[in-house]
Image: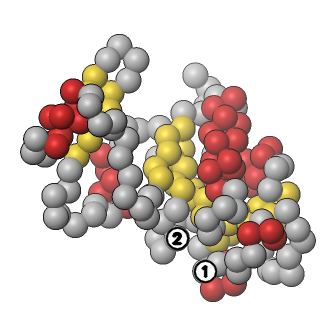
Amino acid sequence: MKLYGVTGWKNNGKTGLMERLVAEFCARGLTVSTLKHAHHNTDVDRKGTDSYRHRVSGAQEVVLASGNRIAIMQELRGAPEPSLTELLARMRPVDLILVEGYKGEPHPKIEAHRAAAGQPLIAPNDPTIRAIATDTPIDLDRAQFDLDDTGAIADFIAAELNLDAPAR
């Protein structure tokens, strides 16, 4: 499986870029999965649902299955957060995994940057950031793309990974 990241500070367009890249690569015939890191306390379950009740009762793992999807919720209950490598090993094989977040991991990344967010670039101190997707020109020795030019960004990632649309 090929792996590429989208990183950047909060409110700089990471999730929108991820969403557009997933759609673009899928339209090119690739199978794509995503892995997103959340720095805050997050819960995908809703209070009152049966699965929520199972989990808060003490279950270590709750699998919610239907004809449309499967959700696996695992409670860490004090155990350390799994590493990116451990999480990737749990994922089913696809052509491309796009990772949102995980700034400190060594995989190649593109940084999303909006001038209005007022945050500094991460790229100058991080050689794993191979390009910047931005809404303003930046004086930096990396490839730069308009934040909304999804096709060009996808072309860059595909070239970096030697990723061609498979013959299926």
Image position, residue 40 (x, y; %): 42, 62
Which secondary structure, mark 2?
Answer: loop
First in sequence: mark 1 vs mark 2: 2
Camera-side residue of 143 and 48: 48
Q: CA distance from mark 1 to mark 2?
A: 9 Å
Dot 2: within a 10 Å radius of its alpha carbon, few (fewer than 14), some, or many (20 or more) residues?
Answer: many
The residue lying at 30 percent from left, 46 percent from top is: 90
The residue lying at 15 percent from left, 34 percent from top is: 54
Give, as a three-letter code, the residue at label 2. Answer: Lys
Camera-side residue of 78 and 131: 78
Image position, residue 13 (x, y; %): 70, 56
Of the 4 image quadrants, the one containing the C terminus is: top right
Q: Quadrant of residue 92?
A: top left
Marks 2 and 1: in contact by CB < 8 Å? yes
Dot 1: within a 10 Å radius of its alpha carbon, few (fewer than 14), some, or many (20 or more) residues?
Answer: few
Label drawn at residue 103: 2
Measured along the vertical axis of the image, is residue 44 above or below residue 49?
below
Which secondary structure, mark 1?
Answer: loop
Measured along the vertical axis of the image, is residue 40 above or below residue 58?
below
